[in-house]
Amino acid sequence: MNTSARNREDAARKDTILLERISQGDSKALADLYDLHGRLVYSLAFNTVGVRADAEEVAQEVFLKVWNHAASFDPVLGSPLGWIVTITRRLAIDRTRSKSYKSSNRSSEFDEAVIATQDRKQVSDPTENMVARLQEGIVKKNLSQLGEKQLEVIRLSYYESMSHSEVSEQLGIPLGTVKSRLREAINQLRRIMEV
């Protein structure tokens, strides 16, 4: 057996022991498991959800599931790390499928586009500035400078909280076209607001 395989086997054995202790209510074992794999869990979640706060929530949910279901882990079926990775992927995917996530993610993408413009203008507090600009109606005014097709996908996606697939179905256009129109609209809005 080579060194790499031996190290993986040792790590799996250590994780299995930690899961056994967790199943007996040992919170220190959960903390140790988190120290070992928390960063990986967060990274996997972030790669799927793309938003820090959501990735942090997914990571918390993963370790809560581990705490509640450690006794159900069966080492015959796979490694503890494989089990944790599977839980992470499922929870992250579930998060992205939820309608509230889709809506908040599109809104944050839209807000980030405008805030990024503000950051480049050396604004001391981009969040305050963004709120003020929204209240003044500047963003909506600038939206009117977009083309009709771009404005329609922005309206359906951001203001009516439709998924890209729902927009595609509503407008009778391919999904790729919806995504490219949204991307073009956001880029154009960035350029308009940089002036």
Image (cartoon, rainbow, N blue to C red):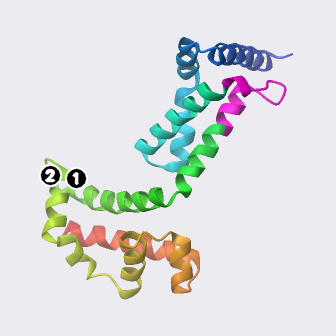
Q: Is residue 148 magenta?
A: no
Residue 165's quadrant in the figure?
A: bottom right
For the C terminus, the image quarter is bottom left
Local crowd size for mark 2, using a 10 Å CA cut-off: few (<14), some (14–19), many (≥20):
some
> Which kind of residue does numbered mark 1 sit on?
Asp
Disc 1, SS: helix
117, 143: nearer the viewer: 143
> Which kind of residue does numbered mark 2 sit on?
Val
Residue for badge 2? 123
What residue lies at 53% left-to-right and 12% top-to-bottom? 28
Q: Position of residue 97 (x, y in %)?
A: 56, 57
Q: Position of residue 108 (x, y in %)?
A: 36, 57
127, 185: nearer the viewer: 127
The image shows a total of numbered marks equal to: 2
Contact (CB < 8 A) between labels 2 and 1? yes
Tell me if residue 122 comes above or below residue 148 in the rendering. above
Read off the magenta span: 70-86
What residue lies at 31% left-to-right and 81% top-to-bottom? 146
Residue for badge 1? 119
The residues bearing labels 2 and 1 have C-alpha atoms spaced at a distance of: 6 Å
